[in-house]
Image: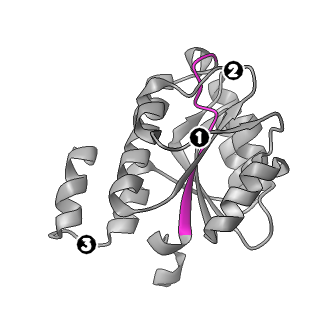
Amino acid sequence: MSDQSLVDREDCVLVVIDVQEKLMPVISGKERVIANTATLVRFCGICGIPVVFTEQKKLGPTVPEIKDLMRGFTAVEKLHFNCFLNDEFRDRVERLGRKTLIIAGAEAHICVAQTAIGAPPGLGVHVVADAVSSRSPDNRTIALERMREAGAVITSTEMFIYEILREAGTDEFAAVLPLVK
């Protein structure tokens, strides 16, 4: 394998799907999903990686732990499970010109899976396994397997962070270290 298979910070965008107040209370491992998603958002802020986040209509706002980190940004409100069927979402991602999606959120077997599998040709997809979940652990497991079979790379919060950092001993590494300790 070559270095080409690693995520490139200049070519990725974090997509946070439906981490919302009315949905998260019933999500398996919700504390882990919220904490890891917040870590990803903070990390992307430090590294200048853009973030796009969505809210499914009628499920309330994004949870405060993440919404507070997204000041100055507005969520893409949607009805479709596949985010790419929403014109505003698709336009935001296209305008960024990034070719790799880093996906976190809920539910793994519905909106996360349909967005990952339904991403337009030419976009790479990395699903952050410890930042996605469903109401049922079984649905999460099946969704991760299905997304992998469809070509998504399954990663973790720390794996993504260290792939982007590439090395220790930098000012950026020092700034990020508290996020992973």
Residue at numbered disc 3? 167
Mark 3 burial class by Cα count in 10 Å: few <14, some 14-19, many 20+: few
Q: Tell me, for residue 74, which label it has, or none.
A: 1
Magenta region: which residues? 12-22
Q: Nearer the viewer, mark 2 or mark 1?
A: 1
Identify the element where label 1 is drawn. loop
Compared to 134, does 17 lie above or below? below
Q: Which residue is mark 2?
A: 59
The residues tagged by marks 2 and 1 sit, at their Cα atoms, a distance apart of 16 Å
Residue sitting nearer the eye, 90 or 28: 90
Where in the figure is residue 52, as x and y percent of width and height?
Answer: 59, 50
Residue nearer the viewer, 148 or 122:
122
84 vs 106, left or right, is right
Say which label, 2 or 1, has the lower sequence index. Answer: 2
Membership of 20 in magenta stretch: yes
Position of the C terminus, as image quadrant, is: top left
The CA span between labels 3 and 2 is 40 Å
Q: Residue at point 65% right, 34% down?
A: 140
For badge 1, the amino acid type reads: Thr
Residue 106 image position (x, y, % from top left): 64, 33
